[in-house]
Image (cartoon, rainbow, N blue to C red):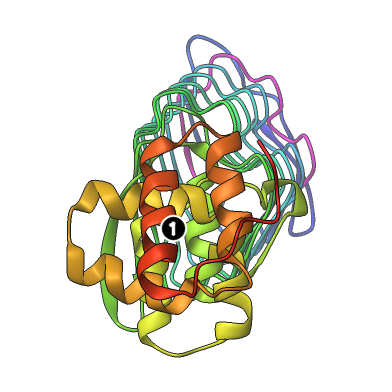
Amino acid sequence: MDFLLNGGILQSYTGDSPEHPVAEIPWGVRTIAARAFENCVHLKEVFIPATVKFIESRAFAGCTALEKIDIPRTADSVGMYVFSDCIRLREARLGRMLFLEEGMFFQCRALEKIIFPESLKIIRSRAFQGCTSLKQAVILEGVQEIESRVFQDCTSLEKVILPESIRKIGNSNFPDTLHQLHYCFHGNCYVSELMGYFSIIETIATLHGIFYHPSLRNGAMHPLLFQKLHFHEDEETIIPLLRQNSCTAFEVLLKENNPDRISEIAGILLTPETIDAMILDAIEKKSYAVQSFLTDYKYRHFTFRPPDFHL
């Protein structure tokens, strides 16, 4: 037998060879021990029985010929870096787990498709870091947290679909190549054609009122941020954020060329107390269209007084 077993624990696999590219784990195994298949470089496929409940850390790490993995629904605990450096792994179907642990598919450069379980709540850090063939990630409703660097260095990633249940997103999560973000808010689905890296986090965080990493707070604004205002929720948070980023916000609005929308948002954001600071911000950023709009708005809507700053 090619397996070293201790009761219901598979401690190691000894059958790795070019003549044995497939391993079928015996029925009755409940735990695949840490590093049990590590660096089995000839292994292309593994059949995991429904009796398995625990797969420990690095169990299949470095299996460079492994192409596909199907974790049964019974396996609700899978350890860290369990498939790291499986450079030919193309597809993975995950079992019924609550947590997708740190580095689970770290540097799986051929991974193209991942099927998330409906039970998933948290995706730990670096879970897909370096998965350079991954083009799309569909995260199911129920996931509440995506930790830091989950999709870092996924240089082919173009589209991410996030559910309404997301409440926390860590830093450095998405590559610069990502240009389209799909997400849900109040039962409605939106497609965000991103204006830059930071707008990913800024959009989600502001729309949902969720926590986001402090280093991302100066990101670009996006038109869909204004959707939040229509629900009249947490205006004490959203309006200061929009005012703080007013130059970018009004750049977006002016490009939309929708006078009614511009008037509506301006009526919410602009006050005699804040408009001078916004004009100064536009001048510093050389956003002359915004400067012209704000100056004209001040003349038309507020009693004119000299600005509090000098050029």
- Which residue lies under the disc numbered 1? 116
Quadrant of the rendered image containing residue 198: top right
Q: Which residues are magenta?
A: 33-47
Is residue 20 one of those drawn in magenta?
no
Residue 234 drawn above or below residue 46: below
Residue 37, visible in the rendered structure: yes
Frontmost residue, 70 versus 98: 98
- Please name the residue shown 51% across and 37% down the image: 197
- Percent x, y for residue 73? 48, 66
Frontmost residue, 227 versus 208: 227
Frontmost residue, 243 versus 135: 243
Is residue 41 one of those drawn in magenta?
yes
User: What's under tag 1, amino acid-wise?
Assistant: Phe
> For this view, does 106 lie left or right of residue 109?
right
Residue 24, visible in the rendered structure: no
> For this view, does 145 lie left or right of residue 44?
right
Q: Tell me the chief SS of the magenta region.
A: loop
Quarter containing the C terminus:
top right
Residue 220 drawn above or below residue 121: above
- Percent x, y for residue 147? 68, 54
- Please name the residue shown 49% across and 75% down the image: 303
